[in-house]
Amino acid sequence: MSKRLTDLFARCKADNRAALVGYLTAGDPDVASSRELLLALADKTDILEIGMPFSDPMADGPVIQAASERALAAGAHIRDVFALTKSVRDTHPDLGIVLMGYANVPFAMGFDRFAEQAAAAGADAVLIVDIPPEEGHICDAALKAHDLDRILLLSPTSTDERIRLACDNGSGFIYYVSLTGITGAEMGDVRLIQQKVAHIQAISAAADNPLPVCVGFGVKTPEQAAQVAQFADGVVVGSHFVARIADGDGSDVVRDAISASAADMRQAVQAATGASA
Amino acid sequence: MSATPPESDFASMYDLNITHAPDAGGHFGRFGGRFAAETLMQPLKEIETAFFEAWADGSFHAERLDLLEHYVGRATPLYHAERLSAENGGAQIYLKREDLTHTGAHKINNTIGQGLLARRMGKKRVIAETGAGQHGVATATVAAMFGMDCDIYMGREDMARQMPNVLRMRLLGANVIPVDAGTATLKDAVNEALRNWVATCEDTFYIFGTAAGPHPYPLLVRQFHTVIGQEARAQILKQAGRLPDVAVACVGGGSNAMGLLHPFRDDAAVKLVAVEAAGYGLKTGKHAASLAAGKAGILHGNLTYLLEDDEGQVQGTHSISAGLDYPGVGPELAFMLEEGRLQLDAASDDEAMAALQLLTRCEGIIPALESSHALAAGARIAREMRPDQIVIINLSGRGDKDMNTVFRQLGWLEDAS
């Protein structure tokens, strides 16, 4: 497991707070603006998920679909994703960085080359939405060879058997999808989320390699982030930040909006468990 | 896996053994698998379990085969197209008349099977993607018959091309949901149906339309369509006293192709030919020939051949037929191609149009534009063969839905766009 992610969750735990995880799609709305936006979000978060644009983002709602479309239309390439990752890494040595996307982009590159370049750019982990543990044979060895964690997802439909599968095959952290649906949908009943997360944490604690559990999909307001921060090890916010890009009329305005809403989220997450800022 | 076949002459035509099964994870060699989001892994497993239980249950087949006989109108004829054969001057051409099924295309074989499975699993709502609209119509038909709610996802581009089918689906009580994302065609309709299913899987069954997608769909769709090839095999033995030399089917995702070709797979002397849509021509880049011009990739839950750029971004496709306009292909066809069991061919928009007109004029049968691709390549192959040889072509659907496109191509209609 990436030492950076281990240390980061240990620090959050010592501070008695959940980690704040932010998501933006690389290259949205264009590569140069995207660099500014990623750096602004990196300033306010513990972990940054950098989305790799894909033509067919099947698990994403309209907001992140549009982000992928804008990035690809503006000519974003996988080499830009790595360059943006490196820019963030160079200025944020302690930030956790997760490359997130769909299988076909790394598959087209070859997972060995992909993992080599992702690691060289400074990523700590990789989250591929459509490679469940059962299909890990196509990427696990390559990721491991380059010390990249493989973040696996769990969802409300995951059985105990699947939870154990994710704990045994995943590393870095578990990403719990709070709802049965796509990114940016409405967050479900927080008590049900809490129950399932506690259940996953219990199974994970009994595994050889206990993993923190971060909760995402549907967290859109500081109030929701605060609720989730009370029981999860991390709170993931994506569509809420990406939507600022769709709303904004210029790069500085968008950057300031993302920065301000990330600051609100951070404050909410810290206040939730009484941690000091 | 086998079940006791129901006792009737009709049912005894069908072999219920599953041959050439994928591995436990749904892999056909390096292809196939279950590359799905976590939320769908358990629902897919449940469908897999339900499918194997149903397939081993004689009462499931009794009901399925009863519906295929009395509702769908099976067995469909195998028709010796003597005038078409003479016109080409080569091998004898036999047409497997899937165009004569209820709803007008082979798609209903699968929707009956999956509809029964959905009912068995207690699902109240079904969803489907559709390209040409044939799978959408077949799904809406089964939903009406079983009294289920039905939502069909269809690219806006395809809705414009296949308006009669859109209206038929509405008449059948289905809700047709336009998809504007991406290229607004079949692949985007699949994306949108998957997005909906992720949110609704508890009460909703996704009736997938082709022999692709995450395991168990490629297996399940193939099994529900093997009635085509099993009938054709028995019919040609009865009518001609021998097996065909060649069996030909068009390929979009591969449902009618697997249906016809799979039952001939162990007949080593029978050549199996898959015909892709060459659109404006393979060299123009504007086509839908994933096997001929694509490379291995991962989309819609399976590893298969895809039309994509160097960085794995899936590309838009072109074909005159909406039903073939898909950048992927069933994983088992990809496997059969690499294994050397499948031969590839392609037909352009123009060749398909010519084949449609030729069949219409010399046999009085108006084929679907999809099937016209198989006719074009099948006739080309037949011309190189002797008159005592036999080619079976899958006439997978009828052309009614394509009349506007055809009339416009012929210049008989003002272009509405």
Image (spheres, grey):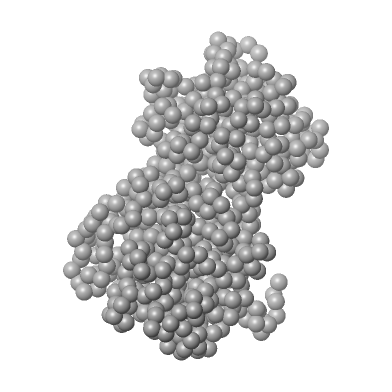
Residue A83 shows in the view: yes
Left or right: residue B104 versus residue B11 is right
- The quadrant holding residue B103 is bottom left
From the viewer's side, name the closer residue of B369 and A147: A147
Q: Is residue B24 above or below residue A122?
A: below
User: Residue sitting at 74 percent across and 35 percent down?
Assistant: A34
User: Residue sitting at 25 percent across and 71 percent down?
Assistant: B13
- The quadrant holding residue A101 is top right
| Residue B219 x, y percent position in the rendering | 38, 55
User: Residue sitting at 47 percent across and 44 percent down?
Assistant: B35
Q: Is residue B122 above or below residue A191?
A: below
Please identify the quadrant where the C terminus of chain A is shown. Answer: top right
| Residue B413 x, y percent position in the rendering | 67, 82
Left or right: residue B170 versus residue A221 is left
| Residue B7 x, y percent position in the rendering | 18, 68
| Residue A43 x, y percent position in the rendering | 71, 22
